[in-house]
Image (tube, rainbow, N blue to C red):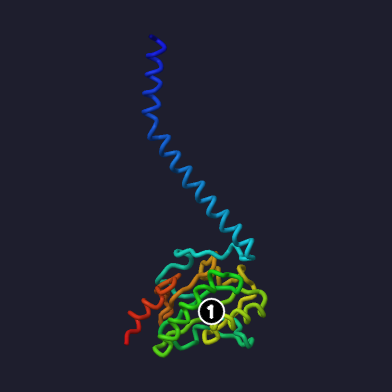
Amino acid sequence: MLFNVKFITFNLSLNNCKPFFVSILSVMKKFILLLCTISFSIATADAQNISVYSFVLPDEGIVINSTAPDIILPDVNGNKIDINKSDYKYLLVNFWASWSKTSRKANPYFIKSFNQFQTKGFKIVSVSLDSDTNLWQQAIKEDGTSAFFQLNDRDGMKSAYLKDFEVDFIPANFLIDNNGKIIAKNLRKDELYKLLATLLPN
């Protein structure tokens, strides 16, 4: 009889603890899923020779409404270009690299926006982080982005401009108005086109 009483008491204790264990298991599952996702991303990147610096992080970079840092870098002809001296209504600064498939998949959307709004004062500055300029220029030809301002920083992911823009991963992009203010960032797919359609209506 005593044994049965203790057994019942033990079961009641377990029932009382059940919500705690369920909560712990839920957290553990999420943590394991996160680890698996990161491991898969790194494994895929390694298998495809893609840098693990290539991810999509919507909150990446300097905060909106900040003044955009200046960028002075060489173009494909080796001429130093100061983006603050270019004439524009809206300027997209896009950090990318030829080895980043995620970066290059965004180019068709940028081309679409550029073709539609370039006559209204929209420009694009593509800041490549390629250390190999041949691969950089080859990617420009393959992706059909030669109409953009194409600049190159051979310091790669150690670029001082990444630090200025508070970027740790690419791709990362920033839409800047003609007052030099960042008004949007990390626009994906048709988000840029839709935003420009409101900023630069017919």
Residue 140, how many percent across, how many down?
Answer: 58, 81
Q: Which residue is mark 1?
A: 126
**Location of residue 137 by image quarter:** bottom right
Give me the residue at 61% from left, 57% from top: 43
Whether residue 14 is situated above or below residue 54 in the rendered picture: above
Whether residue 25 is situated above or below residue 120 in the rendered picture: above
Q: Is residue 194 left or right of residue 76?
A: left
Give me the residue at 37% from left, 80% from top: 196
Q: Quadrant of the N terminus?
A: top left
Residue 14, how many percent across, how many down?
Answer: 40, 26
Whether residue 183 is situated above or below residue 53 in the rendered picture: below
Q: Amino acid at mark 1?
A: Ser
The residue furthest top is: 1
Residue 200, how many percent across, how many down?
Answer: 35, 84
Give me the residue at 36% from left, 23% from top: 12
Residue closest to the eye, 114 or 156: 114
**Location of residue 6 by image quarter:** top left
Give me the residue at 32% from left, 87% from top: 202
Residue closest to the eye, 91 or 196: 196
Residue 80, how many percent across, how many down?
Answer: 60, 85
Neighbor class of circle 1 (other Cα within 10 Å; few <14, some 14-19, many 20+) is many
Q: Is residue 159 left or right of residue 175?
A: right
Residue closest to the eye, 103 or 47: 47
The residue furthest bottom is: 119
